[in-house]
Image (cartoon, rainbow, N blue to C red):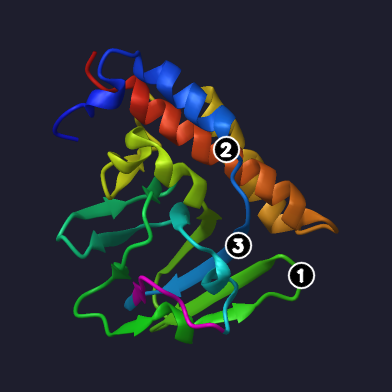
Amino acid sequence: MTATPPSFAKTPPTDVLADMLRAVRLTGACFLKASFTEPFGVLSPRRFDATVPMAHLRHVSVFHLITANSCMIETTNGHRQQLNTGDIALLPFVAEHKLWRGDRPNFVPASQVVARHPKEGVWSFSHGGGGTETQMICGFIESAELMASPMFRSLPELVIERAGDHMVDRGIASTIGALTAQVESLNRGAEVVLGRMMETLFVEILRRHVEQLPP
């Protein structure tokens, strides 16, 4: 972020965030369990094919939670970061990005490797060359109503919460643990519980980001 938008320049960021989140409710979410084996390369598009559930969302915020091993992520603007176990990458705005591991991976569109999971409410990604496995949970959240907020629009294209960062508080840590357990169990009604957990995680990440902004 380069400058504080004048609409909330004199208001504490946490107050603006609270007002923003009270005014809207996140609606609609899709969840994917991903299993990628090295070498792999996946291109997440700006818009998904109509055959997958993410296609119906108006404005998508995407997060990737790494649950095993690591991979690289890169945005179209060349912002590249390594993601390790426990790290969360949040892309507030629907945008093309790449996920990969290994030398010279062959990138395939995500729509080509997504499949319906046996349990309702969750889809899955499976792709790669058969080497070291990287696992992650991917969430796609409908966040169109938040686009009216100057604070939301001023977020960077990629926000990363590091598992080893002491600034990651208990709220995020406990939500990650519960979310991972829920995705693994996939009991009846899991999609409803996952939706609530994803909202909580989304809000926690935004809160952490806002708290770290300069006064």
Tag of residue 24? 2
Q: Is residue 34 above or below residue 26?
A: below
Mark 3 residue element: strand
Question: Which residue: 59% across, 45% down?
Answer: 26
In front: label 2 or label 1:
2
Question: Which residue: 38% across, 49% down?
Answer: 92
Dot 1 or dot 3, earlier in sequence: 3
Callout 2 amino acid: Val
Query: Label 3 belongs to which residue?
Result: 30
Dot 2 or dot 1, earlier in sequence: 2
Q: Is residue 60 above or below residue 36?
A: above
Callout 3 amino acid: Cys
Residue 131 shown left or right of residue 114 in the figure? left
Q: Is residue 46 within the magenta segment?
A: yes
Mark 2 residue element: loop
Q: Which residues are magenta?
A: 42-50
Rendering quarter of residue 153: top left
What is the spatial separation of the Cα atoms under label 2 and label 3, in whole angstroms?
19 Å
Q: Is residue 36 within the magenta segment?
A: no
